[in-house]
Image (cartoon, rainbow, N blue to C red):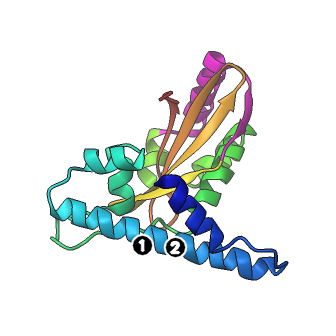
Amino acid sequence: MKTHTDALLASRVLTTDHDWTHTIGHAVSIQTAADDVVRAVVRQARRNGATWQVVGDALGVSRQAAFQRYGKPVDPRTGEPMNTTPLPGTTELAASTVEDLAAGQWARVTEQFDPTMRDGLPEDALAAAWAQIIGLAGAYEGHGEPEAARAGDMTVTNTPLTFEAGDYTARITFRDDRTIAGLHILERQTP
């Protein structure tokens, strides 16, 4: 059945025509329609009692990832649906912060901290924390693409970090004013 469906979908876009703009645009519209179908089926499954674990298993992701993509969290303070759209530009902010950390630009990083972070993690403590990671995992080699998700009133980013002897994740939490409310370097868990 899957091969038949794949062939049917491919036949709708594969062409001998060399108008690739049209062909690619048509393929994207099919993908968008498929995403809409998945969203509708997930909503129906949830209305009929399927747990987020069941949904996640079907999608090949964790139940939390399924909820973050398709869930509609309700703010317990107001009873209203929560904003789930990440703050625009936070993946770029996260990448820039990681690059500043790797370059030893402690002041540039701490300037972005909100007052609580600034009080709790001054420049020298940030430098010491980064040195501790280097001591555990060797030289910093680079970072991957940050991912962002809205969590209540903040946007949380996760950026994969590669060191010569270990992999970590930089989890940076941004307030809507773009200040940093949290910065953690976590050992990356392998699935």
Residue ID at (72%, 22%): 164
Q: Are marks 2 and 1 in contact (CB under 8 Å)?
A: yes
Q: Is residue 150 left or right of residue 146?
A: left
Above or below, 153 relative to 184: below
Disc 1 on helix, strand or loop? Answer: helix
On screen, residue 168 above or below 94: above
Could you say which disc has been placed on residue 32 in the image?
2
Query: Residue 37 vs residue 20: left or right?
Result: left
Residue 37 in picture, x, y percent from top left: 39, 70
Residue under the point 40% across and 50% down: 59
The residues bearing labels 2 and 1 have C-alpha atoms spaced at a distance of: 6 Å
Is 94 in the magenta? no
Residue flagged by tag 2: what amino acid is it? Thr
Residue 119 in the image: x percent, y percent? 45, 44
Residue at 55% over, 37% down? 169
Query: Magenta segment, which residues?
Result: 121-144
* Front residue (pair 56, 15): 15
